[in-house]
Amino acid sequence: QKEVEQNSGPLSVPEGAIASLNCTYSDRVSQSFFWYRQYSGKSPELIMSIYSNGDKEDGRFTAQLNKASQYVSLLIRDSQPSDSATYLCAVSNLDSSYKLIFGSGTRLLVRP
Amino acid sequence: KAGVTQTPRYLIKTRGQQVTLSCSPISGHRSVSWYQQTPGQGLQFLFEYFSETQRNKGNFPGRFSGRQFSNSRSEMNVSTLELGDSALYLCASRGPGQGPGELFFGEGSRLTVL
């Protein structure tokens, strides 16, 4: 079992819709959770970090964390074609907090 | 403010050779991490340095090594290259006040081993 699992997609949504990206992790001691966006041929870019249970909103993005279910998600409201990219979920643990474990990413396609 | 700079951007080597990649972090950032990205394995952690000290190392063979200099610039070295080392090598820096996983990535060094 992979430590961080994501559906590879592609997840296809129409412009203006809500895109929901999901991630599960296996290590219960995971403490910090991150969403990175990677455009094709580019490097990853941090878009959200979340450290405690619940929701965290930043503009059109909302990260949701449920540690009991070992589940973290990213919602993108009013999706735009420019949101088309691969979204990487990453986690770090208390005992090695400077090491990020990445999922394989979910490719999102926003159709105009 | 300049971003994370990695050199070279592209390089081709043959099996058995060695390679050194360089990374200049964002000014004021003292933490530098290295990741390997491949289509099959995704992004995998190599190591992390802070103030010239390696704080974490990933599950890579000893052929992979790194160091950090007093000006926070970092290098990684891969010796005795294998075909499977072909990958995009990403360097990331983190500044004071940022969370452990809040990284700024460079554009990467794409290594092809023939």
Image: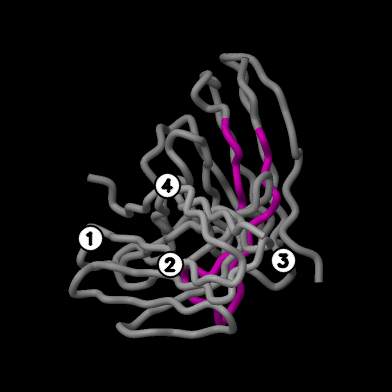
Q: Marks 2/4: CA distance?
A: 13 Å
Do the residues at pointers 1 and 4 share their chain?
yes
- Indicate which label's residue lies in the foreground, 1 or 3: 1
Query: Chain under label 2?
Result: A
- Vertical placement of residue A92 versus B5, above or below: below
Q: Earlier in the sequence, mark 2 or mark 1?
A: 2
**Residue at x-position 62% and y-position 24%:** B18
Instruction: Please provide the residue range marked out in magenta.
Output: B87-110
Disc 1 marks which residue? A27
Q: In which quarter of the image is residue B89?
A: top right
Mark carried by residue A20: 2
Q: How far from the left and from the top, in percent, is residue A29?
A: 23, 68
The answer to whether marks 2 and 4 mark residues whose Cβ atoms lie closer than 8 Å is: no
Amino acid on which disc 2 is placed: Ser
Q: What crowding class fits label 1: few (fewer than 14 Cα within 10 Å), some (14-19), or many (20 or more)?
A: few
> Is A2 rendered above or below residue B99?
above
Task: Kindly identify the amino acid type of the residue bearing the numbered disc 1.
Answer: Asp
x%, y% of residue A93? 32, 65
Q: Nearer the viewer, mark 3 or mark 4?
A: 4
Question: Which residue occupies the foreground of this view, A111 or B10?
Answer: A111
Rounded to the nearest angstrom, the CA distance separating label 1 from label 3 is 31 Å
Could you tell me the amino acid type at mark 4? Ser
- In terms of sequence position, does the residue under pointer 2 or pointer 4 come before the other? 4
**Location of mark 4 (residue):** A8
